[in-house]
Image (spheres, rainbow, N blue to C red):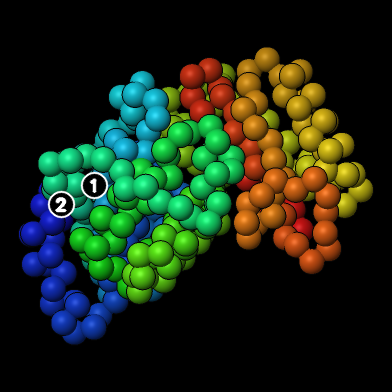
Amino acid sequence: MIFHEQQLLDKELDPYRVLKKKVGLVPTMGALHEGHLALVKKSVAENEITVVSIFVNPTQFDNSKDLQKYPRTLDEDSKLLRSLNAKILIYAPQPDDLYGNKVVSKRYSFGGLEKQMEGKFRSGHFDGVGTVLNLLFRAIRPDQAYFGEKDFQQLQIVRKLVEIEKLPINIVGCPIYREPHGLAMSSRNKRLSQVEFDKAGFIFETLQWVRSNFSDKSIPELQKIVQQKFKENNYLELEYFEIANIKNLIPAKRKRKRNKYRAFIAAFAGEVRLIDNMALN
Ligand code: PAF
């Protein structure tokens, strides 16, 4: 069932809330793929009812062309969700149903998490993500909300957001879903040409190479080699490569035994910006 208005969705969810039955939420911007479906299936297994929100959130885009070109495929998305034969409600609002008449971001400080990587290259992005999720969380009041680790920085920020906003929601992180050649699944992949799609497997290969060499090489050495690998690649332009502590996301210069690290990449394939990451230890 598709709801475009909070009020109607609320009516549908109320009986579940009254009976203390668990409500799961999978927030998305649509153009659903297998990765999203894995989140939805997990939510269906762990909750009595699942809401999938489909909303291309304008406040998290710093680039109007990217916002304009973001794929919008509501009919296909709802068909896919219906094919799961589960208790799933779709919430696909217009901006004013969520934001009221001012589609603007709240300013957040996520303890510095918002300043690294995506935060450096996409100004205001995490204020937009925090704002829309806060609105969705308050509208839907889920018990649990599901996010993919492809956007690992976002996942850590959402964990901080529920702390800041004092929302009693369990945030569940789920593994990255990949194409057979390793490219992380993303709605943006729909915008890649066949050649770009094929060549973008290089991002995964590079992350795997970093993981295999993480114990033998220093972080500056790994940095240098990865940058060189991208220079030699004619199809992908590296925006950043970082190895960061998973807790604070501060890029590391030296490894410490007690810390856990991930490698993060953002790169352009033509006009399409792709991100990926991998646990290293
Ligand atoms: O990851 C996304 O698709 C978006 O950032 C989210 C979490 C749905 C917020 O708009």
Residue at mark 1: 78
Dot 2: element? strand
Tell me: 131 left or right of 225. Answer: left
Residue at mark 2: 2
Q: Is residue 83 visible?
A: no
Looking at this rendering, what residue extends furthest in the top direction?
234
- Which is more toward the observer, 116 or 57? 116
The label nearer to you, 1 versus 2, is 2
Confirm if mark 1 falls within 8 A of ligand 1. Answer: no
User: Residue 262, how many percent across, how many down?
Assistant: 69, 51
Nearest to N terminus: mark 1 or mark 2 = 2
Which residue corresponds to the image point at 35% horizontal and 74% vertical from the top-left?
A: 168
Amino acid type assigned to the residue bearing label 2 in the image: Ile
Q: Quadrant of residue 222?
A: top right
Dot 1: element? helix
User: Residue 209, how many percent across, how many down?
Assistant: 79, 40
Question: Are the residues flagged by discs 1 and 2 in contact, CB closer than 8 Å?
Answer: yes
Tell me: 275 left or right of 30. Answer: right
Which residue corresponds to the image point at 30% horizontal and 24% vertical from the top-left?
A: 68
How crowded pointer 1 is (Cα within 10 Å; few <14, some 14-19, many 20+) is rated as many
User: Residue 32, how many percent across, how many down?
Assistant: 36, 43
Which residue corresponds to the image point at 32% horizontal and 38% vertical from the top-left?
A: 59
Q: Which mark is residue 45?
A: none
- Which is more toward the observer, 99 or 88? 99
How much space separates mark 1 and mark 2, taking CA atoms? 8 Å
User: If the image is split into quadrants, where does the N terminus sit?
Assistant: bottom left
Q: Is residue 89 visible?
A: yes
Amino acid type assigned to the residue bearing label 1 in the image: Ser
How crowded pointer 2 is (Cα within 10 Å; few <14, some 14-19, many 20+) is rated as some
Q: Quadrant of residue 236?
A: top right
